[in-house]
Amino acid sequence: MMPKRQVNKKLLTDDHQELANRKVREWRHLAGNRGNWETQWEQAAQIALPAYRNTFNADNIRQPGTDWGQFQYDSTIAVAAERFSAIVSSLITPALERWFSLSAGNPIAKADRNTKLWFEQVVDIVFEYLYSPASNWEGQNQQVFLSLGVFGTGPMFIDQLYKRPGVRFKALSLAESYPRENHQGQIDAFDRCFWLTARQARQMFGEENIPEQIYNALDTNPEALFRFLHVVEPQEDVDPRRLDYKGMPYSSLYISVEQCQLITAPGGYQSFPYPVSRYSTTPGEIYGRGPMLNSLNAAKCLNEMKKTMLKQGQRITDPPLFAPDDGVLDGADFTPGALNYGGVNQSGQMLIHTLPTGNLAAGKDAMEWERSVINDAFLVTIFQILVESPQMTATEVLERAKEKGILLAPTIGRQTSEYLGPVIDRVLSVLAMQRLLPPMPRLLAQTGGAYKVRYDSPLTRAQLSGEAAGLQRTVQPLLEMVKLTGDPTPLDHFNWDAIVPEVATTINAVPTRWLLDAQSVAQIRQGRAEQAQAKQMAEAAPGAAALTNAGASMASAQAEAAKPPPGGGTGAGPAQ
């Protein structure tokens, strides 16, 4: 028997009970209004991700290890979905690159070098914790993009590590995810319904907070499952002077669903912990539509075609046989090299014929058509732009990169604002609460500490590469002109002091700490000018010395000629 426990009676007040009942009713209303979505998700999972089948309703409890792939005949969609996840991840969150940077929101602080270096240090800390093994960012981010491609919506939960400094990430299934939008179409509230065993519930909430039924299960069946609800929504009356949850922008409630009881006291978040990635949305819909849902009919056709082709292939390799009804097939041996008597008549005509099975080539062509549609929808074809022609000049690479950036921007660009932006804000907030960020520079703190996010991913640089390509197209013929004429004045039209730092940092993602500040550049130029002047003087010194010597010799000769002759007189000669 379990020992008698100390119950948290503060959670059992009438106000808290009414709050729990109301939030459970609101969640059930959300769950009841998305039946159409769950039907489409089930159809998509059946063809693309069979392991996700029967997971979209919060009331479903699946038996682990069940084989759900009996209706998947073609793997094209599954492969395209995995490639889509890899493509999106490599384009906007590449693991080996700094795919975002930070800068001050205030123009004065933005120009301060100490502020720039501080933001670079903060970004380094963020990436250190982001890609630490404990955070599980890479695996969970990949799951979000996989769900984005197949179902159009990929939710994520971000919180601090349990009893450790750092951040943890968890990609959520659609069964436990119920996002809500504000009046501007932004997701600002989230209901998460999830299952925990009795043992896990005690670990997460403490035995004094869990309901009686869950507490009793610890003794009889600690692995029994119970359902819980986490509700996060904007705080109505935020008091910034308060240090408790009343001073936080978002409120937080944990509720036991079946018992309609608060599990913890009301809490809060400084930043939204549930960023949601959506591929595209249509008016009046909260959930997104991704490549799979947009090409669902093509995927269904392809799957059915493959099913038919498998049957047809079996008929071709092992065709049905036609024979007269005189029992010629009785005892026939169909092994290779077998000899069967009676299979032909006296004139040599075969008595056994195969059933005509049709032409597989037409079916293969039709399947290829559908595969091309699916690969286009999942961006697989677009991503091959740079791969198809590896032998390209630098200008061609820039042009192709620009083309790819233009093609991908409408679909992938949304991820930076709706998904990655909240992810970065949440990670910074969690690290700041744990005091893992360095103190702000004084100027940044005085200007309010506001910051801006600039995305330095390959996709962003592909979009910005048009500027670099335009510069290269313009400068290249000018360099040829300067080379032929020896006149460098055409290059005077360019502000190289603005071009070089912007191309380096904005387009090519060179860290600020690798570049010299304006004062250091000015000192280098001054030293170079002084060296050039000294060199010029040194080169001119022999000529100047010769000129000086010549001048001295001429002056000496003139002085010598001006002297009076010996013995006095006027120097006009002897007297007559």
Image (cartoon, rainbow, N blue to C red):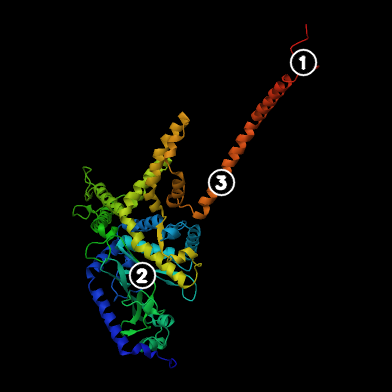
Outermost residue, bottom side: 4
Q: Secondary structure at mark 3?
A: helix
Q: Earlier in the sequence, mark 1 or mark 3?
A: 3
Outermost residue, left side: 325
Q: Residues within 10 Å of mark 1 (few under 14, many from 20)?
A: few
| Amino acid type assigned to the residue bearing label 1 in the image | Gly
| Amino acid type assigned to the residue bearing label 2 in the image | Tyr
| Amino acid type assigned to the residue bearing label 3 in the image | Ile
62 and 549: which is toward the camera? 549
Q: Is residue 170 visible?
A: yes
Rendered-image quadrant of the C terminus: top right
Residue at position x 59%, y 38% from top?
533
Which mark lies nearer to you, 1 or 3?
1
Give the residue pinned by disc 3.
524
Which mark lies nearer to you, 2 or 1?
1
Q: Secondary structure at mark 2?
A: loop
Does 71 appear above or below 262?
above
Q: Secondary structure at mark 1?
A: loop
Q: Earlier in the sequence, mark 2 or mark 1?
A: 2
